[in-house]
Amino acid sequence: MIINQLSEYLIHLRYDDIPKEAIEKAKSCFIDYLAVYLRGLESDNAQIAIKTIYELYGNDFNSLNKGFINGIASHSLDLDDGHRWAQLHPGSVVFSTVLAMISDSGLELDITSEEFLEAVIGGYEIAIALGMLVNPDHRNQGFHSTGTIGAFAAGAVASKLLRLNKEKTEHCFGLCATQSSGLLEADHAGTMGKSLHVGNAVYNGILSAYLAKNGFTGAESLIDGKEGFIKAMASDLFDRQCDDNGNLDDSKLSQFIDMNLNKFHINNVYLKKYPFCRHIHSAIDSTLALKNDLKDLKDSNNLKIDCSDISSIDIETYKIASEHDNYNPKNEQDLKQSLPYAVAIALVLDDLSLDSIDELIDNGLFDEKSADKDILKIKEIVSKINIDNNEKLNQMTPEKRPSKVTIKFRDDSYEILEETTYYPLGEVENPLKEEDILDKFKLLNPKFNMNKLQIIKQMEDYSIHEVFEELDLLD
């Protein structure tokens, strides 16, 4: 049973057995998480969640409520880390869980910094291994992996922090399985439900661990059983493991988990620079490269090319990315899923920072009557964008996430500009540098004392409570 395998791996994971590369990547992911989480607390999603918790519980911000808010805040900006093969965002779940539990003074957890890193890396590993196992079938069936598999990640973190034994860890994972949820339609419908999935995952993972700690049981068959998670939520995968008589042979599933645990997949996690859905990023990168080419063309020929000179912008990309074809976003959530608007904004604005996009929204981006010059340019460009699901590019996924952007002009004397990006910025093949991560943090949180982040790099020299106190993360 897969739950047995996950539990066995988790309880034996020790800091001394983790490669230095994975430790350093976990620390970078923690800095990146804090950058997004702290700014995310200001988002409408998080503020509504905080108001709701106050209405329901007063000032009782225990670890469950903290985790719920942390998850929503860290996923609301579409700037959290991710893994392209697992098709999920592990950091927003993993760090939201550990932050909620360690910062809750009522729990009095005596956790070392090494145990913090064990829990984090264990949570990433389990989330990514499960995501790789069930996707793309799980996603194709309409589930948002960050919400569904996120429950297991949160449960793994909470179980590790509580030092549960193998039996109780198994019960925790069984309870996580039966609570996992999150519909992909919420991602594409322009609602706040996408971030709610992460809040729920954190909440349910912590709850499952504490229930298991106190003797509540959850079946070990709840992932790969005949009526378990895979059967219900990745049914095509389940059916492929059955013989002609419908009897399940789960040996290949177990073998996959064995092969993909303890590989330290956190090393392959990407970090994001732009506040848009990850499937849009390769088109943004191609567009930014063409923007430089366009500038060179203008400067070298002393031309004054503007939006009206462009006849068309063709975007060829893989299937999932091509489906982000919203030409008429109605709100901020819609915008983050809109490929045509992301490309148009990349061409018009000097940067794609959250502040720049917020300013666009404040100036009436969703108002059909807005007279703002930048908004008018963006909408003109959007009207010239064509999106094509390119089968050749589709065949390259998930190994790559390619997008080709071509700009054509009304004047045939201008050369056609085209650029293809295979690995968007932030992937391990095209990584953000340490200074890029720190710049992202400072841009999102200009009032934060950046010197405080130094303690994360040497966190093993301090207790985890000293680290959290330095970072102002305790109650």
Image (cartoon, grey):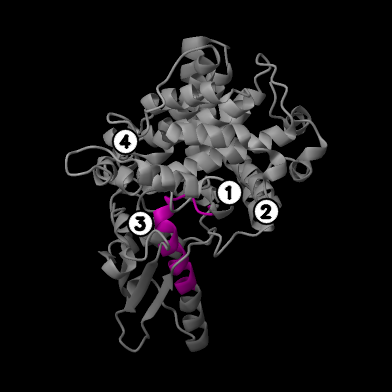
Residue that sits furthest to the right in the current view: 461
Magenta segment main secondary structure = helix
Q: How far apart are marks 4 and 3 (CA)?
A: 21 Å
In the image, 53: left or right of 407?
A: right
Contact (CB < 8 A) between labels 1 and 2?
A: yes
Dot 3 falls on a residue whose secondary structure is helix
Q: How far apart are marks 2 and 3 (CA)?
A: 34 Å
Q: Position of residue 328 (x, y in %)?
A: 28, 50
Q: Position of residue 37 (x, y in %)?
A: 58, 37
Q: Which numbered disc flags the more N-terminal residue, 1 or 2?
A: 2
Q: Distance between the residues labelled 1 and 2?
A: 9 Å
Q: Which numbered disc flags the more N-terminal residue, 4 or 1?
A: 4
Dot 4 falls on a residue whose secondary structure is loop
Report the residue marked by disc 4.
183
Q: Distance between the residues labelled 4 and 1?
A: 28 Å
Q: Distance between the residues labelled 2 and 4?
A: 34 Å
Contact (CB < 8 A) between labels 4 and 1?
A: no
Report the residue marked by disc 3.
339
Contact (CB < 8 A) between labels 2 and 3?
A: no
Does 278 appear above or below 15? Answer: below
